[in-house]
Image (tube, rainbow, N blue to C red):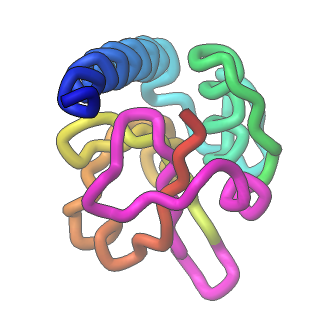
Amino acid sequence: MANQQRAPQQSATDSGQRSSILGALEEAHREWQGTPYILGGSGINGVDCSSFTQIIFRDYLGKTLPRNTRAQLQEGNSVRRNQIQPGDLIFFRTGRDLLHVGIAMENGRFLHASVSSGVMISRLDQNYWASRYLATRRLF
């Protein structure tokens, strides 16, 4: 009985936190949308994927992340692909030695700094991303 009583409180807390994270990510998207991808860039005039996630986590979500993708891949806890939640870091292998990172939103969407289109929202089920999925890490 005690577990049944605690579960709804946990779900409400989780739901509230996810909603808060999602709101922050939507605000970040509005403010950063279209910012061009520049390798090594770290600002509104140009940003790369790992700098973008570092900035969004710091400025919108209140968490510190390392600067590079490989170091970010070591943060938090591993999450199964079918359990991704808003705020999770999603990693892709885009080349033999190249990694890409974005931030999960909801309904299979993720926010990232794309090489081709700058800061944007993409979908995990798009062939390009689905075939390159590597891992998900949860920091919250």
Quadrant placement of the C terminus? top right
Q: Position of residue 112 (x, y in %)?
A: 48, 42
**Left or right position of 71 against 5:** right
When the figure is inspected, residue 96 is found, relative to residue 5, above or below; the finding is below
**Quarter where residue 51 is shown:** top right
Frontmost residue, 138 versus 98: 138
Q: Where is residue 71 in the image (x, y as percent from the top left)?
A: 78, 57
When the figure is inspected, residue 47 is found, relative to residue 128, above or below; the finding is above
Residue occupying the point 34% across, 41% down: 85
When the figure is inspected, residue 126 is found, relative to residue 89, above or below; the finding is below
- The residue lying furthest to the bottom in this view is 96
* Residue 100 lies within the magenta run: no
Frontmost residue, 132 versus 14: 14
Residue occupying the point 18% across, 30% down: 1
**Left or right position of 58 against 89:** right
* Residue 78 lies within the magenta run: yes
**Left or right position of 59 against 80:** right
Question: How many labels were placed on the picture?
Answer: 0
Whether residue 26 is visible: no
Q: Start and end of the magenta stretch?
A: 69-98
Q: Position of residue 80 (x, y in %)?
A: 37, 64
Frontmost residue, 27 versus 85: 85
**Quarter where residue 100 is shown:** bottom right
Whether residue 114 is visible: yes
Residue occupying the point 44% across, 58% down: 79
Frontmost residue, 123 versus 86: 86
**Left or right position of 132 against 11:** right
Q: Where is residue 9 in the image (x, y as percent from the top left)?
A: 29, 17
Residue occupying the point 37% across, 34% down: 86
